[in-house]
Amino acid sequence: MSQPQPVTVLVVDDHPIFRAGMATVLGDLPGVTVVGEASDGAEAVAAAARLLPHIVLMDLRMPGVGGLEATARITTVHPEVAVVVLTMDEDDDSVFAALRAGACGYLLKEADGADVHRALLGAARGEAVFGPRIAQRVLAHFASPHAARDTLPFPQLTDRERQILDLLSRGLDNTSIARHLSLSEKTVRNRVSDVLAKLRARTRAEAVALARDAGLGLP
């Protein structure tokens, strides 16, 4: 009887010691093979395209192209590649931004080897995988009567304001946004001002940065 193919993993983290340690731990797990490492999101996107691993184990906070944008790029172009986030961030905004970007799993860096092993094998089978604390919070969140609204990024914004913020994050100027939404430029200008005020952002660039951190403006 032929042996099952190992689950191939690309490890992405900007801390070389952690990245090397994780690669060593994963390499010792049965049924798992580490095929590459990347130190930031841009390297991760390129490596994923070159190696086509079963799983990308993705950190979120990295210089340059961060984990959210890298996750969106990878899962959009290579939907057969599963992304499992491994991070220190356990706040709801980070969890749901990662899921919106296309991640199929979310683990904390405190997870032990057995938890990571189970998550990788589960993700390779097409399952959604979460660490115990994250799973409890996700279930509690969706059990809330306000879950549908609260799951959206920036719940203080109206749907139209969030739509405009998303278009801003994609690089559109006021004229292009007005044309895209069939609005007047004055209306767009006023809505952008409202968005900046509600986000307490001093500039459009600052609002775009906040939006991208929340998963808006991604492919």
Image: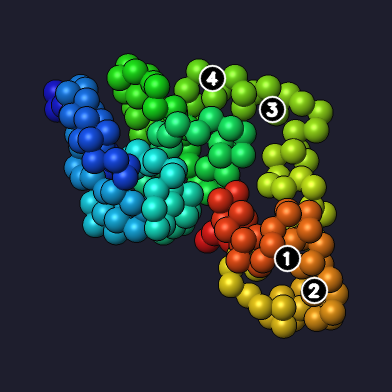
Disc 3 residue crowd, few under 14, some 14–19, many 20+, Cα 10 Å: some
> Alpha-carbon distance for marks 3 and 1?
26 Å
Q: Residue furthest front?
A: 202
Q: Are marks 3 and 4 in contact (CB under 8 Å)?
A: no
Of the two numbered discs 4 and 1 on the same chain, state the one appearing first in sequence.
Answer: 4
SS type, badge 3: helix
User: Which residue lies at the image location 48% right of the left edge and 49% below the top edge?
Assistant: 68
User: Which residue lies at the image location 43% right of the left edge and 52% below the top edge?
Assistant: 66
Disc 1 residue crowd, few under 14, some 14–19, many 20+, Cα 10 Å: many
Of the two numbered discs 3 and 4 on the same chain, state the one appearing first in sequence.
Answer: 4
SS type, badge 1: helix
Of the two numbered discs 3 and 2 on the same chain, state the one appearing first in sequence.
Answer: 3
User: Which residue lies at the image location 72% right of the left edge and 83% below the top edge?
Assistant: 175
- Is residue 20 shown above or below 165? above
> Alpha-carbon distance for marks 3 and 4?
12 Å
Can you identify the residue that label 1 sits on? Answer: 164
Indicate left or right for 191 with 175 as reference: right
Can you identify the residue that label 2 sits on? Answer: 188
Q: Quadrant of residue 85?
A: top left
Can you identify the residue that label 4 sits on? Answer: 133
Can you identify the residue that label 3 sits on? Answer: 141
- Is residue 58 shown above or below 174? above
> Alpha-carbon distance for marks 2 and 1?
8 Å
**What residue type is disc 4 on?**
Arg
Q: Are marks 4 and 1 in contact (CB under 8 Å)?
A: no
As rendered, which of 15 and 94 lies closer to the eye? 15
Q: Are marks 4 and 2 in contact (CB under 8 Å)?
A: no
**What residue type is disc 1 on?**
Ile
Q: Are marks 2 and 1 in contact (CB under 8 Å)?
A: yes
Q: How is the image coloured?
A: rainbow
Indicate left or right for 99 with 18 as reference: right
